[in-house]
């Protein structure tokens, strides 16, 4: 089971956090700091797993973003890596060649996608199409003229 | 809008995010405020900047919320609020707005509201109850998207109290026509189960629904229900509920592995790998110790693995590992596991550390079932032991720990200790210490090795933190004190003396070189100092007997240690040690000791203060000192009955004079106690520093006499003979002075003639017992209080008492014969020798391997190969070879810490190889004694030490007088203690 998921930039800035287990605000910020130290300073080519407290940290870097997952020690690390990859693939489909900026400015969208994918700390949807269809339907329902949006 | 375009370009450059076509993402979705916020946060360079920006933003948000604005505006504010929350700031002001948004008709507004609530709301917030209505409304909506968003939010927004409100609705939704709704409803049920626990399953309706969703026509719903079943099966109590479903789970796994699911479930070529993994875990849980269920599984497991192997990607390997894990958890089928282990080479020989890590993990689970299957991969294991990757290394050490047995304990432990020295991670260190001590207690080849290992661990700085279990150190004391062989005592005394002397010499040298380098000197842990003090006080005379120069140097060094930053309790051990050394030197009080006692009479640590007073008093009488601090009498028992009887006269006298009666501990419980936190640590006391208690009057000792631990008090009560002795006195000051005065007049201490006679035999026996170092079995029939016994002693001098079952059968038969240690060693060496042959053959096949690694592999893995070919192992080996290899093993430990007591080792080893027959003959008597003590009321060693301080306070209020009962124990363990009178004379 996932305890939390973090998206960190290479500079150590938080891009997205999702907590599945109850932690206090203090714990949350301490964990984020600790983990970003551990993950960002880890030399490449070592394995993507870290033992941390009673949990396990599994991370993967995509371009300038680190996707970090904290899960139970009994979880299968490789399959968790694949969940991360699955998430990235869906983001990529949705945004079309996703980049960090997409996630910065549409971070709530990323949350919606994540919510479809993982519920209560377990992976629930394996089909990219289903997730994308759901999100698209929601987008379609809310499309309405927005005057005050940035128009580029 | 030109301006904002420019800004974005600037932002991209400033935050150094190199993204081609960065603008495409900002397609008309975000508003300017949010953009500004993100931009300024991205530009901020320090934590203070960020704090300032976020605080400003929060102010703005509050203002906006207080105004009457459009829903769109609020939605944007909520998104900014979530952003602030994500950065780690509290945003309680927006909860209610978010809750209102969930009632909105626009689905996006609704979702944003739910998102804000589920992300920001802390656990058990009062708004959770208010959210119930709005969620229920969402669940009843006709639009399935609204239902979905409500269900998604529920996984976070439900707590135990609100579950009943939703239960019926969720069960209804399990029959919804849309499969996605059913799936999410199952997820919500999973959440309920996590909150409620086992009692959740007692509802039959829930149970039926769960099984129904397992058979759902949509595989995604079924997959979701598997998650719940997996969670349920993690609790072993629940397994009976699920055991009848094993055929269904096996069937599902078979179908998934065959590829019967629709193509949408294919991920990287494999059908729903997550479902497969979950099913494998589930089967592993259900098949533990269950032969029938396990038999169902073997075929499918094999099939699943074969299917997964077709894909050489992460997913395939993940399933491969999980299958092996399952196979080793359920009732084992060795053939199958053997077959699987052949597939591991692809993982272990991979260049990627992730896969190596998985290979090692798989080996770790295999080694439990069939250790010999690790053999083909020894080179890979050794390589990953030396890997630069910390995670991989730890896993390999874990593997090493699990495959340890009698034959490879020595190289394994030296490897673990090596790692202990190198590692910086405190968690990892304490794990290593646990592992080493556990192995040493279970498989130790001989006493000398055990002592070497434990003392090496103790002497590694920072290896043991205060919170760790330190029982193993006390076990060492127990082992040495109960050991009859004087060489053992000699050996341990040598180790600690050398350590002390070397360390101090280094210390002095460094001090001479530069005063600033003092910080570099290693500081030993508290527990090490305690053990060292005890060993030196008891056995240093074996090494440096009658050499007063050296003994004085030792005292000097110990005094230096007292200057350092140790806990008060630790210092009290050192003081006792100095006291005993002084007794051995003839019991004369030297100026040095006077300075010492004067200093510690005012120590903040009560226990060291008390020891200091005791020492001061004892030193005044040279005859007394040898009685109170006898030489090597640690294991002798004390007759409490006699002591208590003799005190009755005191108690009665004082009651006649109006003293209070003794009040049992239970009745005293409600009276307030003086409670000073942290009283042990003389160093940690900062802030309020009040002096407690004023020490100069030695009679104050009466006020502070610690009481025995609770167990001992119960013992008092259980023993009717001692009813009277419980009337120990509680006196006020006047009475006390009178009392003391009286005693002086009588010039007789509470010990009667009868007791004197009892003590005398001890005195005369002591010199005799000493050379043989025989611990005195208790001969007094009334002795109820035996030696302090540690709770678990897996390994005593008998060898491995707790682990006979794990010894190979061949050696088990010889286990009880005399000189078993010797034979065992020989056997081990035979194994190793035979292995060398085997290894050499392997080497021929296996070219181009680093010889050092090969050697290490040989040491570590020999034992398993042994088991393969026990029949061939009867080659004769010479004792000389034995000695060499043993020497090497001991040396390897010593080298790590650069101690130079190897000479001593060599001696001792040769002695061990030819052990005196007395060891064998005394074994049985030792055993009897040991069991006897176990059955009696034994004070736990650890308890007594830890209870010291509390007991002092518990008695100070009632001013109890307790008696100096355990002469030796009080001195070594600092258990209940004291001199009955300032200056008693027993002669």
Image (tube, helix red, strand yellow):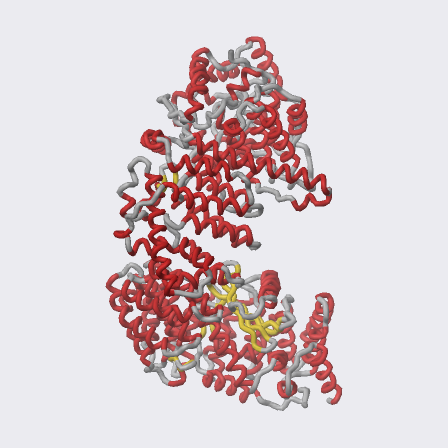
Is residue B512 shown left or right of residue B829? Answer: right
Can you give x and y, in whole percent of width and height, for residue B424 in the image?
57, 54
Can you give x and y, in whole percent of width and height, for residue B120 in the image?
58, 69
Name the residue furthest top. B745
Quadrant in the picture for residue B753: top left
Quadrant in the picture for residue B111: bottom right
Residue B164 seen in this snapshot: no
Can you give x and y, in whole percent of width and height, for residue B855 in the image?
43, 56
Name the residue furthest right. B3
Residue B230 seen in this snapshot: yes
Can you give x and y, in whole percent of width and height, for residue A123 in the image?
45, 74
Which one is in front, B279 or B206?
Answer: B279
Against B460, residue B130 (above or below) is: below
Is residue B769 shown left or right of residue A109? Answer: left
Taking the spot 61% from the left edge, 26% from the top edge, the residue there is B552
Against B357, residue B984 (above or below) is: above
Is residue B685 shown left or right of residue A76? Answer: right
Against B378, residue B604 (above or below) is: above
Is residue B819 shown left or right of residue B36? Answer: left
Taking the spot 50% from the left edge, 87% from the top edge, the residue there is A137
Which one is in front, B586 or B943?
Answer: B586
């Amino acid at each position: 089971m996932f305890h939390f998921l973090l998206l960190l930039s290479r500079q150590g800035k938080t891009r997205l956090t999702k907590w599945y287990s109850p932690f206090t605000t203090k714990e949350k910020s301490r964990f984020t700091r600790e983990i970003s130290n551990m993950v960002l300073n880890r030399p490449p080519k070592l394995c993507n797993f870290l033992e941390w407290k009673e949990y396990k940290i599994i991370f993967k870097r995509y371009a300038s973003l680190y996707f970090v997952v904290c899960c139970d020690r009994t979880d299968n690390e490789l399959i968790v890596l694949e969940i991360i990859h699955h998430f990235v693939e869906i983001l990529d489909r949705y945004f079309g060649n996703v980049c960090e900026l997409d996630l910065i400015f549409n971070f709530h969208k990323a949350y919606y996608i994540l919510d479809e994918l993982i519920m209560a700390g377990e992976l629930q949807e394996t089909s990219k199409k289903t997730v994308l269809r759901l999100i698209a339907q929601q987008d379609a329902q809310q499309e309405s003229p927005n005057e005050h949006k940035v128009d580029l | 809008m030109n301006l904002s375009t420019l800004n974005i370009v600037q932002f991209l450059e400033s935050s150094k995010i190199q993204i081609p076509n960065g603008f495409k993402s900002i397609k008309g979705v975000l508003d300017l405020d949010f953009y500004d916020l993100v931009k300024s946060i991205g530009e901020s360079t320090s934590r203070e900047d960020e704090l300032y920006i976020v605080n400003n933003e929060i102010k703005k948000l509050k203002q906006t919320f207080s105004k009457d604005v459009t829903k769109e505006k609020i939605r944007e504010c909520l998104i900014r609020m979530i952003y602030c929350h994500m950065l780690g700031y509290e945003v309680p002001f927006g909860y209610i707005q978010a809750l209102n948004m969930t009632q909105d008709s626009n689905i996006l507004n609704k979702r944003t509201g739910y998102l804000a609530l589920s992300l920001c709301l802390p656990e058990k917030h009062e708004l959770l109850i208010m959210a119930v209505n709005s969620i229920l409304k969402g669940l009843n909506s006709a639009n399935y998207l609204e239902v979905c968003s409500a269900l998604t939010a529920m996984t976070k927004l439900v707590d135990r109290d609100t579950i009943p409100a939703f239960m019926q609705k969720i069960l209804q939704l399990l029959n919804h026509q849309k499969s996605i709704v059913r799936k999410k409803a199952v997820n919500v049920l999973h959440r309920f189960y996590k909150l409620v626990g086992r009692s959740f399953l007692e509802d039959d309706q829930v149970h039926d629904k769960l099984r129904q969703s397992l058979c759902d026509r949509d595989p995604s719903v079924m997959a979701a229900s598997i998650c719940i079943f997996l969670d349920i099966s993690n609790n072993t109590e629940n397994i009976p509920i699920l055991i009848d479903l094993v055929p269904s789970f096996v069937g599902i796994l078979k179908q998934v592995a065959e590829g019967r699911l629709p193509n949408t479930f294919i991920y990287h070529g494999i059908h729903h790998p997550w479902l497969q993994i979950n099913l494998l875990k589930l089967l592993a849980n259900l098949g533990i110790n269950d032969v029938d269920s396990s038999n169902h599984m073997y075929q499918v497991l094999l099939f699943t693995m074969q299917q997964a192997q077709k894909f050489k990607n992460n997913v395939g390997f993940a399933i491969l590992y999980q299958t092996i894990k399952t196979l080793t958890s359920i009732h084992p089928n060795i053939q199958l596991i053997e077959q699987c282990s052949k597939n591991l080479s692809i993982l272990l020989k991979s260049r990627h550390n992730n896969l190596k890590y998985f290979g090692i993990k798989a080996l770790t689970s295999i080694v439990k079932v069939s250790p010999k299957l690790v053999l083909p991969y020894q080179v890979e294991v050794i390589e990953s032991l030396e890997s630069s990757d910390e995670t991989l290394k730890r896993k390999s050490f874990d593997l090493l720990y699990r495959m340890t047995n009698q034959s490879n304990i020595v190289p394994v432990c030296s490897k673990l200790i090596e790692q202990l020295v190198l590692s910086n991670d405190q968690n990892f260190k304490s794990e290593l210490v646990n592992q080493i001590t556990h192995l040493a207690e279970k498989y130790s080849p001989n006493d000398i090795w055990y002592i070497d290992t434990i003392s090496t661990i103790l002497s590694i700085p920072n290896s043991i933190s205060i919170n760790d279990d330190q029982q193993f150190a006390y076990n060492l004391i127990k082992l040495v004190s109960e050991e009859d062989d004087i060489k053992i005592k000699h050996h341990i005394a040598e180790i600690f003396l050398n350590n002390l002397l070397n360390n101090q010499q280094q210390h002095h040298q460094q001090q001479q070189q530069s005063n600033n380098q003092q910080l570099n000197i290693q500081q030993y842990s508290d527990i090490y100092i305690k053990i060292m003090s005890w060993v030196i006080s008891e056995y240093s005379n074996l090494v440096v007997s009658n050499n007063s120069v050296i003994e004085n140097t030792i005292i000097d060094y110990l005094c230096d240690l007292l200057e350092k930053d140790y806990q008060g309790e630790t210092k009290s051990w050192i003081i006792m040690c100095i006291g005993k050394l002084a007794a051995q030197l003839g019991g004369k009080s030297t100026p040095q000791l006077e300075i010492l006692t004067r200093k510690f009479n005012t120590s903040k640590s009560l226990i060291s203060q008390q020891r200091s007073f005791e020492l001061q008093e004892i030193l005044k009488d040279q005859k007394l000192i040898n009685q109170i601090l006898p030489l090597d009498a640690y294991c002798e028992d004390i007759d409490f009955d006699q002591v208590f009887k003799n005190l009755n006269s005191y108690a009665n006298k004082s009651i006649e004079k109006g003293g209070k009666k003794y009040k049992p501990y239970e009745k005293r419980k409600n009276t307030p106690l003086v409670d000073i936190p942290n009283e042990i640590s003389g160093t940690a006391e900062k802030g309020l520093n009040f002096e407690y208690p004023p020490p100069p009057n030695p009679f104050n000792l009466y006020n502070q006499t610690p009481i025995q631990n609770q167990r001992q008090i119960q013992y008092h009560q259980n023993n009717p003979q001692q009813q009277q002795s419980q009337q120990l006195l509680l006196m006020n000051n006047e009475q006390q002075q009178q009392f003391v005065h009286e005693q002086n007049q009588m010039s007789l201490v509470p010990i009667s003639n009868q007791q004197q006679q009892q003590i005398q035999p001890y005195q005369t026996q002591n010199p005799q017992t000493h050379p043989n170092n025989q611990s005195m079995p208790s001969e007094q029939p009334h002795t109820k209080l035996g030696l302090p016994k540690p709770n678990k002693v897996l390994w005593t001098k008998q060898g491995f008492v707790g682990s006979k079952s794990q010894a190979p059968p061949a050696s088990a038969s010889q286990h009880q014969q005399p000189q078993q240690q010797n034979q065992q060693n020989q056997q081990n060496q035979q194994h190793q020798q035979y292995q060398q042959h085997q290894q050499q053959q392997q080497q021929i096949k296996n070219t181009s391997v680093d010889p050092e690694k090969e050697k290490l592999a040989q040491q570590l893995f020999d034992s398993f190969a042994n088991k393969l070919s026990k029949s061939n192992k009867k080659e004769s080996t010479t004792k000389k070879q034995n000695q060499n290899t043993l020497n090497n093993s001991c040396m390897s430990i010593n080298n790590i810490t650069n101690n130079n007591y190897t000479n001593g080792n060599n001696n001792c080893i040769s002695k061990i190889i030819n052990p005196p027959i007395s060891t064998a003959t005394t074994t049985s008597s030792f055993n009897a004694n040991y069991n006897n003590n176990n059955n009696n009321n034994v004070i736990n060693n650890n308890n007594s030490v830890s209870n010291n301080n509390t007991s002092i306070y518990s008695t100070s209020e009632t001013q109890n007088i307790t008696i100096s009962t355990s002469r030796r124990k009080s001195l070594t363990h600092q258990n209940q203690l004291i001199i009955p009178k300032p200056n008693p004379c027993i002669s």
